[in-house]
Every structure is written in C-alpha cells, then in structure tokens.
Amino acid sequence: MLGKLIKHEFRATARTMLPAMGALAALSLLANLSIRGLTSGLSDVPVLRIVFILILVFFGIGIVAAAVMALVIMISRFYRNLLKDEGYLMFTLPVSVHSIVWSKLIVSLVWFLLTALLIFVILALTALNLSNTNLEMIIEQLPSWNDLMQMLDELGIRSQVMTFLFQWILAMVIGTLVTCLHFYASMSLGHMFTKSKILLSVVFFIGMSFLFNLMEMGYGIGVAGTADTARWDIMNGAEAMRFVSSMTWHGIIISAVQGAVLYLATVLGLKKGLNLE
C-alpha cells in the first residue's frame, strides 16, 4: 500500500514541480544566452542590454523560487491532504499512519534532491559559460575512476574519502527528512487543538527549533571537551580525515535523534489527538 501512496503523491506533486523545473531549465538557457550577449557586441544596444540584465535577474529569482517551491509543496501537501477536509478520507483508508507519513517523506525527499541537483547543474554550466571554459575539455582532463582510486591509495586516504562521501550522502538525506519532519510535527501538534491551529503550529515549530539548538550546543560542547584537538597542528592527512569523519558521525547521530523525536511527535499527533474540526 505504501507504493500506491507514493505513486499517488508523485502524481499530485508532479503537476506543479515538473513545470516549475522545466521553466527553470528554460530560464537558465535564456540566462546563458544573455551572458553571451552581454559579452558580445549585442550589449552595445541599450534595449538588448536591459533585456539581458532583466533575464539574469529573473534567473536568480527563479533559482530561489524553485528551492522555495519544493518546500512550499511539501508543507501544503501535508496540510491540505491530512489536516484539512481531505484528512477525513485519508484516515479512512486501510493504511497505517506510518505509511501515510513515509509516503510524504519519500516523495518530498526525492523532489528536494532533484531540485538541488537541477540547481547545481544549472549553476555549474552557468559558471563554465561565464569563464568561457570548454566543458568537453574539462571532461577529457578528468582522471578515470581507477586513476582516482590509485591516487587516493598513494595518499593513504582512500577509505577515509569513501567514508566521508557516504557520510555526506547520509547527512544530506537525514537532514532533508528532519527538515520535513520538523514542519510535519509542528503542524500535527498544532492541529491537536480546536482553536488557533496555525498559530500553535508556528509556536511548536519555534519551540522545537529552540530546544534542538540547545541540544546541539550541549552535545557540541560535550564532544569538543572529549576530542583531542591539541594534535590538530601535527596531524597528517589521514589523521585529519579520521577526525573530521568522527565529528561528522556525531552530527549525523544528533540529526537522527532529532528525526526520531519529530517522527514520533508527527505520528502520535496524527494518531491520537488530531482535530479536523
């Protein structure tokens, strides 16, 4: 049943996200053409120069809007689908609250990652365009996978680099899920009451943010007190990588704990005290 919920969620969100991503891609093409125009003789024409500059301004706004839209879609789908009138239908389906929440989380995670990837590719291509760098030349100069692994082996940091890459991906996924759950938990707890639901959701959001910041500060102070930072100046590359990896694991652990608390609050809020009136 989880698969069907995910499929339905993708269909519902794709109606907005795909056109938005397509529009951003088209706008990036116009922006790159504008960059070429500004660096050519066309910029001598005042009207064209103004058009090129306006396109670049809208391009910058479009990048921010794409990131914000992914967040807005994530929040609005949860709110309208579970906390408004649609919630009466959703909670009569023969599925668990866990499946409903995970379908929202998985689909939101995918859209966030796709949006981030699209923005990264667009900005990278724009940077290459600004520097007049040949993309094919860069690709040809990149080392092969075997050459890269051999170089890391010679430096003695292959395992550390691979671990760090895994940690980076894991931290990105967990961080995205925690962000979603922060909004979900706040809305679920706020809608347990009969009045001022939106206001209470905001209060819960701010309150949990404050508590989590205190948790992170306390945890960070505790870790810093036990970490051997005195040897930082004499660490070699492999030792420095291991130290950074250890600190990254601590960050992942505290994010996972926050995610577990937020997930529990979301599920309990939807299961036990949700007020749809």
Image (tube, grey):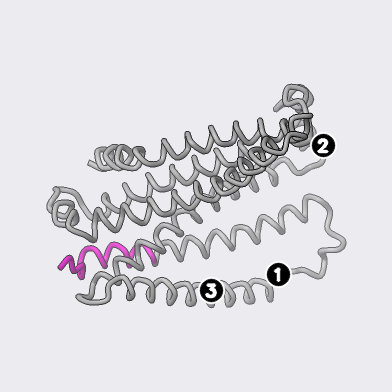
Residue at position x 68%, y 72% in the image: 224
The residue sitting at the right extreme is 234
Over which residues does the magenta segment extend? 262-277
Classify 10 Å Cα crowding around label 1: few (below 14), some (14-19), many (20 and above).
Answer: few
Residue 166 locus on image (x, y percent): 59, 45
Question: Residue flagged by tag 2: what amino acid is it?
Answer: Glu
Work out how far the residue at label 3 is from the one at label 2, CA to CA, in angstroms: 41 Å
Mark linked to residue 27: none
First along the sequence among labels 1 and 2: 2
Specify the principal SS of the magenta part: helix
Q: Which residue is mark 2?
A: 154
Q: Which residue is mark 3?
A: 213
Find numbered disc 3 in the image and state the secondary structure of the residue it sits on: helix
Find numbered disc 1 in the image and state the secondary structure of the residue it sits on: loop
Residue 22 locus on image (x, y percent): 47, 34
Question: Residue flagged by tag 1: what amino acid is it?
Answer: Ala
As for residue 157 lying within the magenta part, the answer is no
Residue 219: image quadrant is bottom right
Camera sees residue 102: yes
Question: Residue flagged by tag 3: what amino acid is it?
Answer: Asn
149 lies left or right of 76: right
As for residue 272 lying within the magenta part, the answer is yes
Residue at position x 14%, y 49% in the image: 93
Classify 10 Å Cα crowding around label 2: few (below 14), some (14-19), many (20 and above).
Answer: few
Cβ–Cβ under 8 Å for marks 3 and 1: no
Find numbered disc 2 in the image and state the secondary structure of the residue it sits on: helix
Mark linked to residue 227: 1
Work out how far the residue at label 3 is from the one at label 1, CA to CA, in angstroms: 21 Å
171 or 90, which lies in front?
Answer: 90
